[in-house]
Image (tube, helix red, strand yellow):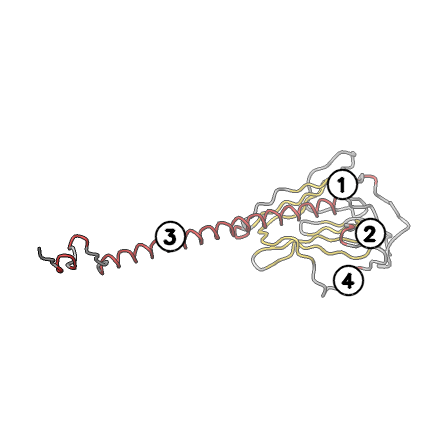
Amino acid sequence: MTFDVLRFTRRNPRGAQRGFTLIELLVAMTLVALLMTLVYEGLRSGQRAAETGQAFIDRTNRLRITQEFIRMQVGRLMPLAYKQDTTSGKLYLFEGDHEKIRYVAPMPGYLGYGGTYVQELELIRDGRDRSLVFRHWLHNGFDEKKIDQSEPPILLLSGIRDGGFRFKGLNPEGKVGDWSERWEDSQLTPLIIELDLTMSAESRMDWPVLDVVMMVDGGATRGFNAGFFPSGG
């Protein structure tokens, strides 16, 4: 019997290991790159969706907070004079037109302000659109002539295309009158103040019409505190 060394050392062609061809490597790398691209795009889409959702929430919160602030401040309007005409003796308890209102009300306690303040809401021009701003001054000693015009107002809302204030009060018959864009009698406060705004397309917001009903009887405010007026004439 002979021992064939080559028989045991010769490699079996069927069991031979072969590597990947160049084409197979290229295909595999392409598939991996495509998979990575899909994963990356999925992550970016998810991030954009999250940012869009957060932006929507921020816009909604901005509208809600603005409306709540206006409703709270204007709704607590007080029939207090903040100005008096030294010639005619006419008192000013409320002034309002389509773009601005001025009145007296307490400030929110959480802001750290005490007492009553002369407050003003105004729509001002801001480029192509307009913005709603808020100003306030201490009621005691208020003098319109001494207002610091350089002090910037508080921005409540921007991106407003159109709109403004409207007012309802009592007519001479003692009934609720029609809407008016100008409040004529500064010695009376309105019964209802409406703020209707049209937002710009870029703002991606819709303003719900805001109607604020006064907590005081607007028809009974004439002559209230008739002997009082701030230091300004």
Secondary structure under the numbered disc 3 in the rendered image: helix
Cα separation, mark 4 vs mark 3, equals: 60 Å
Disc 1 on helix, strand or loop?
loop
> Residue at position x 82%, y 46% from top?
79
| Mark found first going from the N terminus, 1 or 2 | 2
Q: Which mark is residue 116?
A: 2
Is disc 4 placed on a helix, strand or loop?
A: loop
Residue type at tag 4: Ile
Q: Quadrant of the N terminus?
A: bottom left
State yes or no: discs 1 and 2 in contact (Cβ < 8 Å): no
Distance (Cα) linking label 4 and label 2 = 17 Å
Residue at 62%, 58% in the rendered image:
125
**Circle 4 residue:** 147
- Comparing marks 1 and 2, which lies closer to the viewer? 2
Dot 1 surroundings within 10 Å: few (below 14), some, or many (20 or more)?
A: some
Residue marked by disc 1? 214
Task: Indicate which label's residue lies in the foreground, 4 or 2.
Answer: 2
User: Reading the chain from its start, which is encountered first: label 4 or label 3?
Assistant: 3
Observer able to see residue 120: yes
Q: Label 3, on which residue? A: 38
Residue at horizontal 70 percent and vertical 54 percent from the top: 134
User: What's the residue type where badge 1 is placed?
Assistant: Met
Q: Specify the amino acid type for callout 3.
A: Leu
Mark toward the start of the polypeptide (4 vs 2): 2
Judging depth in this view, the residue of 95 and 52 nearest the camera is: 52
Q: Would residue 101 appear left or right of 232 to someone viewing this image? A: left
Nearest-to-viewer mark from 2 and 3: 3
Sequence-wise, the earlier of marks 4 and 1 is 4
Marks 3 and 1, how far apart at CA: 58 Å
